[in-house]
Amino acid sequence: QVQLVESGGGSVQAGGSLRLSCAASGDIRSRKSMAWFRQVPGKEREGVAGIRTSDGATFYAASVKGRFTISQDNAKNTVYLQMNSLKVEDTAVYYCAASEGPSSWFAPSPYQYTYWGQGTQVTVSS
């Protein structure tokens, strides 16, 4: 079992920055891949960034590449999502997720992830 707790969401103006944190606890073997997803009402959950916990390899969706950075602090069992140059269209509920699959970090799909945080709202205004 893995427990994930997100923090760091909020409201910001376009062009601003936010950093999301995801504190993980539980079976480390179940966290071979970690990812951040986002979802807006009426749309499917979208994978925006993934990280392979063994070596820190990362993946970014085209919509956020160059603006978002996923990272991890293994000593704190925490994964971060640094979001810069935020746009109105980045507004969503952001979820942290963990997968036992060692390849799930690449182009993450919600169907590959077993463990989910509660979500944190990010609102970007113009």
Image (cartoon, helix red, strand yellow):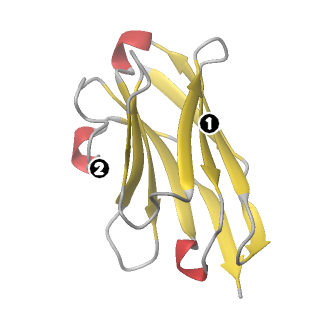
Q: Is residue 58 above or below residue 86?
A: above
How far apart, in angstroms, are the residues tagged by discs 1 and 2?
Answer: 17 Å
Q: Is residue 108 above or below residue 92?
A: above
Crowd rating for badge 1 (residues with CA inside 10 Å; few <14, some 14–19, many 20+): some
In the picture, the quarter occupied by the C terminus is bottom right
Question: Horizontal and vertical percent for residue 54?
Answer: 39, 15
| Circle 2: residue type | Pro
Considering the numbered disc 1 on the image, is that residue within a helix, a strand or a loop? strand
Instruction: Give the left or right position of residue 13, taking residue 102 as reference.
Output: right
Instruction: Give the left or right position of residue 96, taking residue 88 as reference.
Output: left
Question: Horizontal and vertical percent for residue 103?
Answer: 22, 30
Q: Is residue 110 above or below residue 23?
A: below
| Circle 1: residue type | Val
Taking the view exactly as shown, the residue that stands out farthest to the front is: 66
Q: Is residue 43 above or below residue 8?
A: below
Give the residue pinned by disc 2: 110
The image's mark for residue 5 is 1
Q: Residue at x 55, y 63 (%)?
A: 93
Q: Residue at x 75, y 68 (%)?
A: 16
Q: Is tag 1's residue or tag 2's residue first in the polypeptide sequence? A: 1
Considering the numbered disc 2 on the image, is that residue within a helix, a strand or a loop? helix
Q: Residue at x 67, y 73 (%)?
A: 123
Taking the view exactly as shown, the residue that stands out farthest to the bottom is: 126
Q: Residue at x 44, y 12 (%)?
A: 28
